[in-house]
Structures are given as C-alpha cells and as structure tokens.
Image (cartoon, rainbow, N blue to C red):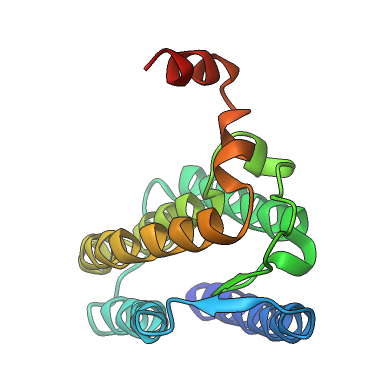
C-alpha cells in the first residue's frame, strides 16, 4: 500500500509538471522562442516512462519491500523534490522538459542556477537512484542511472549549444567564477 501511494504521488507530480511545461512552451513560442533537440526528446520521454514501468515491475514481481535505510532515503527523496521545485520556480515561465530558448532572453542566474548550470539534471540523476533504492529495486537503479547518463550525454550539449547561440549564456556563467575571467584573458 505504501509503495502504491508513493508511486502515485510521483506520477501525479510528473503529470502536473508536464502541464506546466506545456503552458510554458505555448507562452515562450508565442514570444518567438525556438525549440531544439526534437530528435532526442522522444528518447528522454521513453527513459522516464520506462523507469516507472520497470520500477513498478521490479518491486511487484520480486515483492520488494522498504529498504532498511528508508528513513535516510526518504530524506534524500524530499531533498530532491525541494530541489526540483526550487529549479522549476527559479526558471518560472522558462522552465520546460524540452529545449526551448527565447532569443536574447536574459539567462536565469537565481535559485540553484547561481551554483550550477543544470541543477534539474542533477536532481533527476539523484532520483533515478533514490526512488528505486527506497524499495530495494537495485536493477532499476543501475539500469536507469546508465540510461540517464547516455541521454544526458546528448541532451546537455544540445541545450548548451542552443543557449550559447541565442543568449548570453557563456558570459552569465563566467560570472559564476569571477577568477575564470582573468584566466581566460591570460590564454
């Protein structure tokens, strides 16, 4: 029962995020934003949907139960969810599951984006470990961590390229480490 409730909450959260992403996409494209990465996006969707299916199957078929470390994993899960919400609210109307960039838009440098370029990808990577480990779904944790690495190895360069072409992305993140500006000028 606890497992079903846990998975239902996560799936409802993801459905709500997709609705937000759809609204944000309409808003951005209505103001001239461009979409990139359409060829790899179905693979990202497939990995995320398959993650939940495999997680459900592994826990159900192998009758997995809560991990003995569930209190720690639950805290980590709540931290990932807080990070997810922080990233989403920091980007506001610019948050999306797709790569959609508004030419000339000011690069968001608040919230977790003050510290790292892609906090949401870090959060997803953590979730692909924490969620299955909470119910001892070790196969799901291992397989989808590897699949996520493969997908992000395509996704992040595509996103970085789009942002560099259409915004002041590089300059905004050089300010993240002011000493880098000196080092770059020396080279």
> Looking at the image, which is closer to me, 123 or 152?
152
Residue at position x 78%, y 85% from top? 30
As drawn, 4 above or below 96 = below
Q: How many tags in the picture?
A: 0
Residue at position x 36%, y 56% from top? 129
As drawn, 170 above or below 157 = above
Residue 87 place in picture, x, y as percent: 67, 54
- Left or right of residue 162: residue 145: left
Residue at position x 71%, y 59% from top? 104
Q: Quadrant of residue 45?
A: bottom left
> Is residue 140 visible in the rendered structure shown here?
yes
Question: Which quadrant of the figure contains the C terminus?
Answer: top left
As drawn, 129 above or below 45 = above
- Left or right of residue 4: residue 57: left
Residue 54 place in picture, x, y as percent: 30, 81
Q: Quadrant of residue 135?
A: bottom left
Residue at position x 69%, y 50% from top? 107
Q: Quadrant of residue 50?
A: bottom left
> Looking at the image, which is closer to me, 43 or 10?
43
> Looking at the image, which is closer to me, 143 or 94?
94
> Looking at the image, which is closer to me, 100 or 119?
100
Residue 172 place in picture, x, y as percent: 64, 38
- Left or right of residue 132: residue 21: right
> Is residue 66 visible in the rendered structure shown here?
no
């Amino acid at each position: 029962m606890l497992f079903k409730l846990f998975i239902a909450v996560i799936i409802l959260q993801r459905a709500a995020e997709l609705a937000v992403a759809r609204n944000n996409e309409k808003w951005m494209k209505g103001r001239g934003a461009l979409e990139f990465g359409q060829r790899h996006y179905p693979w990202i969707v497939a990995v995320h949907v398959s993650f939940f299916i495999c997680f459900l199957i592994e826990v159900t078929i192998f009758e997995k139960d809560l991990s003995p470390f569930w209190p720690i994993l639950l805290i980590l899960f709540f931290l990932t969810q807080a990070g997810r919400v922080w990233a989403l609210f920091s980007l506001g109307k610019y948050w999306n599951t797709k790569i959609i960039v508004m030419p000339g838009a000011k690069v968001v440098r608040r919230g977790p984006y003050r510290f790292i370029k892609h906090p949401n990808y870090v959060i997803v990577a953590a979730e692909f470990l924490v969620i299955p480990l909470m119910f001892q779904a070790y196969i799901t944790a291992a397989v989808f961590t590897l699949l996520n690495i493969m997908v992000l190895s395509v996704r992040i360069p595509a996103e970085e390229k789009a942002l560099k072409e259409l915004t002041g992305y590089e300059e905004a993140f050089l300010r993240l480490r002011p000493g880098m500006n000196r080092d770059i000028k020396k080279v």
